[in-house]
Image (cartoon, grey):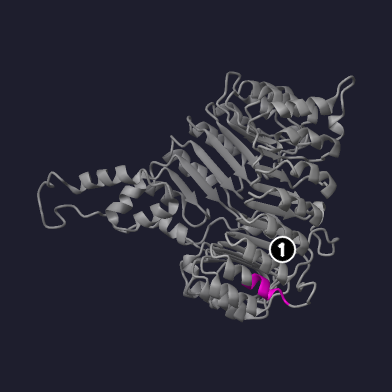
Amino acid sequence: MREERSDMSEDEDGGGGSAKSRGGGGAPPPFSDQVLENVLENVLQFLSSRGDRNAASLVCRSWYRAEAQTRRELFIGNCYAVSPRRATERFRRVRAVVLKGKPRFADFGLIPNNWGAHFHPWVCAMAAAYPWLEKICLKRMSVADGDLSLLAYSFPNFKELSLICCEGFSTAGLAVIAEKCRHLRVLDLIEDYLEDDEDEMSDWMSRFPETTTSLESLVFDCVGSAVNFEALEALVTRSPALRRLRVNHHVSVEQLRRLMALAPQLTHLGTGSFGSAAAAIPQGGNNVVDLVNTFAASKSLVCLSGFRDVAPQYLPAIYPVCANLTSLNFSFADISAEELNPVIRHCHNLQNFWVLDTVRDEGLQAVAATCKDLRELRVFPVDPTEDSEVSVSDVGLVAISEGCRKLRSILYFCQQMTNAAVVTMSKNCQDLVVFRLCIMGRHRPDHVTEEPMDEGFGAIVMNCKKLRRLSVSGLLTDKAFAYIGKYGKLVRTLSVAFAGNSDLALRYVLEGCTKLQKLEIRDSPFGDSALLAGLHHYYNMRFLWMSSCKLSVRGCNEVAQRLPHLVVEVIRDRDEDDDGEFVEKLYMYRSLAGPRTDAPPFVKIL
């Protein structure tokens, strides 16, 4: 919440102090406050960092005003932290807006439907205040087709729209954006949920201008319905600036090949389907050879993703571009180590790699042997259930730590782990900024020694001095949280699942992690005492989420009474649920706007 506080801080009287108010009287001197503010504005316009801008706005009133006048990009990490009116009245020259809605646990189905985070009040306020707006990025927001229509008609010079993990809109809304936003450069739809009835789907792809477009990025791999391929093909032909294209699974391999041939300038490609039944080899043709030749001609490609319904016989087609790749996403590709190895051995420049655990430890060992410049690794489970078969383990983690010593970020899902493996990673990869280890079975200890995983996570916070984000799991006692509180001084985001002995664990974190901004806890034995231990820090945080813990309404009420500027939401799964004193889900956040007015019946604001 510290970011929102400084982003939205405002002096009540808004003054900067005139010459008269300081006792000068009459006309201001030639070198007046206004001249100084003009000079300051000219300097601040070169300040791009949000943190630096927030700090500048808190210096004094004149800096506060000058910073607001020169801010071109507005970032709001919680759409309920400030009202749309307040934001638009303070920042009057904004060209780009980044707006986030639901908490991250919405991705795991822990937020009931229709919880909120509606884009409508924001687009209405921006339509009136920012007619020159060029860019909007929304994450976990509820967006209606009417909102997209208002956006398209309100901003004549609109250029970039990114919707990430959003819901509520359909292809009809996309059609309005495509038709009315004539200067559109970016349309990115990432992990969204579109609400289309089969008989009401719109041919949105054919609504783009029929003249040459300014399109640079088109991402629609999350769209579940088929698109008009002839219209897509024509659009790619009319878009000479197109650099990023990610298509959905309805686009066959042969269709992908045709698109690539039309746009050899692509740097980022999402393949959609990569060898499904829809991509059968046409009669008299050699699909694989043609695809190999097309990839060989795509000399600008540095990022590959997609690979849904992948057929192993098509993977050799990407060999010609592997040497140039810096990013490869196989997180939808159910492939084995034997199928991965011939690909990965060509990827010496890879920096970002996402993959399913079907490659097993052997596949990760191949990655470690080749990808010496790897900075980010994410290993996802093909089967996320607790009793799924072991696919990757401590063996793969150790291999990565020994071979990829430049690693900065890792997300690693596994069924078993050892303290020794985590300690090894902490020593080999001391530049880690993000460490997210998800041991899927509940309360699982070191599978060799049967000891808790305390020493492993303790080593991570002790040895990785740059750590900003940490996710912990497995069998953990209060000792692990004591380590985190003592050594995790730069940790800003902490996620906890199925861990801890008592309230003391959370007390260690809330008292020790002074930079903490986001705290997410689920299925852990923390109660009211642990919650109250953070009263001194909650105003500095963006949010706290706790679900399936041991909280009571009484404890949550005490927080709400003692911190009146904190919004305390108690969430039930359904309107009719009423567990008396027990709190199933708690979401707390600081807000300059006070409690929201659009809370559904299953949300009680204390």
- Mark 1: which amino acid? Cys
- Specify whether residue 96 is painted magenta: no
Residue 512 x, y percent position in the rendering: 52, 74
Q: Residue at x 61, y 48 (%)?
A: 142
User: Where on the picture, by quarter, is residue 215?
Assistant: top right
Residue 109 is at least partly visible in this image: no
| Above/below status of 399 relative to 336 | below
Q: Quadrant of residue 545?
A: bottom right
Query: Is 439 or 224 nearer to us in this picture?
Result: 439
User: Relative to 447, is 152 on the left or the right?
Assistant: left
Of residues 163 and 115, which is closer to you in this image? 163
Query: What kind of element bears circle 1?
Result: strand
Secondary structure of the magenta portion, mostly?
helix
Residue marked by disc 1:
438
On-image quarter of the C terminus: bottom right
**Measured from the top left, where is residue 180 in percent x and y?**
56, 28
Instruction: Give the magenta range.
Output: 452-458
